[in-house]
Amino acid sequence: VAPAAVVLDLSPPPADMEWGPMTAPMLAGAAGLAFLLTFLGSKMMGVKKGPTFLNKQRQEVVLAERTMLSHDTIRFRFALPQKNMVLGLPVGKHFKLFAPNPAGKVKGEWNGREDPEADATEIERKYTPVSSDHELGHADLVIKVYEAGKVDRFPDGGKMSQYMASLKVGDKMTISGPWGMNEYKGHGVFKVGSKERQVKHVGMMAGGTGITPMLQVIAAIMRDPTDKTKVSLLYANQTENDILVRDMLEALQAKHADRFVNLWYTLDRPPPGWKYSSGFITDEMIKAHLPPPGPETLVLMCGPPPMVKFACQQNLDK
């Protein structure tokens, strides 16, 4: 039997997830988002790279632009203090955003459940940007807004997403980073805690918003023509319209088919004629679309805790 692949969960802890629709593998689609995700280094040609912004201390960034990508999905562009400054977020890591803690409709509860943050004055959430350090002077973040009252089961909506939806150009946001135990160093080298591991094939399972850290790693690999690491991605959503950055993923896969060797979707509610999988991620899907276990294989997972625990980890254990 081949040695099992190393498995890394890139998902934020449950306390950092939005209380509400984020607890299911869902994400609103964002048609036209692909043009926003510029992972090539062309923007830095002829421009001297400036200082690094993130230093693990709490700092403020200013909202420079906000763009509606769909009725409930917004791209926020935060300006860094200098135009030639880089965010300074290593591939595989994330940053934290901070906001005032709102009160639920029922005291001590949020979306019908006991709120573990009820006594806190402030909340924090972890995010991966859709921009990279190949872009200077700003950081871009795409957020799906979970509005209160839109779904009966989630009367309070999402805490952080609703706060961010209220921001206007010129408003400030508190940020800190970089955070995280995992980092992609390039050429198949992943740093996991204090140890480094060399792999040749990376399997990825993502659900909903869990695609953003995966896209960060995929983009870093494909951006470097000397990086021969192979990637396979299994991406779960509720409906076809919920597939975020589909155009970008498929463009990357088509351009780099020798390295981005497998891109597969599964939907809870597929449309007629859907050519990919349906339902939750299964062990059969993993066998068919991800690399087999072995010493040169790494599996990354990111998504809502129930998906990671029941659909990903338990099926990997089989």
Image (cartoon, helix red, strand yellow):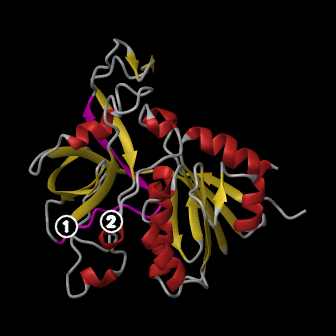
Q: Is residue 198 visible?
A: no
Q: How many numbered marks, from 0 up?
A: 2
Rendered residue at 35%/38% (across/down): 146
Magenta segment range? 84-100
Q: Nearer the viewer, residue 50 or 98?
A: 98
The amino acid type found where label 1 is placed reads Gly
When the figure is inspected, residue 221 is found, relative to residue 141, above or below; the finding is: below
x and y percent of residue 312 in the render?
67, 49
Rendered residue at 45%/65% (across/down): 216
Q: Residue furthest right?
A: 1
x and y percent of residue 272 in the render?
59, 60
> Which residue corresponds to mark 1?
137
> Which residue corresponds to mark 2?
131
x and y percent of residue 147 in the render?
31, 36
Say the numbered circle drawn on residue 167.
none
Quick check: 213 left or right of 62? Answer: right
> What is the CA distance from the residue labelled 1 to the residue labelled 2?
11 Å
